Image: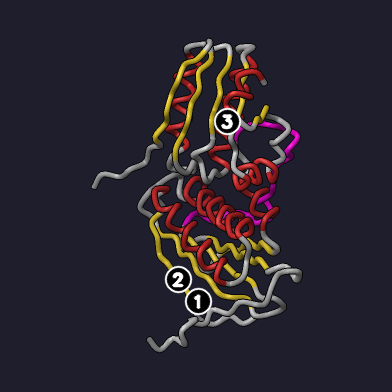
Amino acid sequence: MKDGRPHIMVEMLSNPVYLSGARQLVSSVAQRLGFDEVACSQIALAVDEALCNVIRHGYDRAVDRPIWLSLWPVEEGKGGLRIVIEDEAKQVDVDAIKSRKLEDVRPGGLGVHIIREVMDEVKYERREGAGMRLTLVKRVPMTAGPKATPKCERGCDG
Amino acid sequence: MAERTGLAIGREEREGAIILKPEGDVDMSCSPALRDAIRRAQDARPKRLVVDLSAVEYMDSSGLATLVEAMKVARGQKAALVLCNMSAKVRAIFEIARLHHYFTITGTVEDAMIG
């Protein structure tokens, strides 16, 4: 998978009011990359949950801290979407980031489970210096229609 | 700058039941409003609380947590809590969290009044 510059990079504040904007951005891009409506909604849900975890646990609900959301198309197979969420929040032991047992029905603690359930790849890392990085990958199922590309439908010249 | 953080939440009382109808996305910024509305409704000790989700397009785990908490309160009160009119997208979130069996979910408000 190629890295390089993100095709989209957004810096947002850690204010829950902006979650809907992040969801709409991710869902809209996912749709253009060939995901069906349910998949778009679930990718947006995973991103929402990841951002909520940064706001709630990383920044202790402070509303004025930075979060960077970056998107790349995945080239292999039918294509897909790679999403990276970075912050300057407190660093945690990545091995301690786990889903809880769902049989224990209680409010809270579902975010990591939802993220892992929805996405094909989930990787938490400590950033150099400060903060955490979460990389999420979702691939378009091989049964989907023709591969979509992030090209402009009108040739990108007007 | 003022920020809109609340949900519009309709409330109706019918045959000893309270019906709440949130309108909008139930995410981290809006779930506290739903939590407050449910808490106020449950403080009135209705025999049945119905949450009509027909106008909810999106819900995240904070919304699920709000409803789990409400269900625990309802069970403590020996009252019914019924969710109805759930869209396919919202139902998918309940299924991902394995919560679709934990709640009573009906297709319509009328079914929720007897379900």
Q: For marks 2 and 1, give the CA distance.
A: 6 Å
**Residue A126 horizontal side relative to residue B98, left or right:** left
Per the rendered image, the range of residues in magenta is A89-107
Residue with the mark numbered 2: A9
Q: Quadrant of the N terminus of chain A?
A: bottom right
Real-space CA distance between mark 3 and mark 1, rounded to the nearest whole angstrom? 37 Å
Name the residue that disc number 1 marks. Answer: A6
Chain letter for the residue marked with disc 1 in the picture: A
Is residue A80 found left or right of A90 in the rendered image? right
Q: Amino acid at mark 1?
A: Pro
Classify residue A153 as left or right of residue A78: left
Residue at disc 3, secondary structure: helix
Q: Residue at x 60, y 59 (%)?
A: A37
Please determine whether, in this image, residue A6 is positioned above or below residue B49.
below
- Give SS at disc 2: strand
Please give left or right for residue A104 compared with residue B79 in the image. Answer: right
Location of the C terminus of chain A by quadrant is bottom left
Residue at horizontal 37 percent and vertical 49 percent from the top = A63
Which residue is labeled 3 in the image?
A: B67
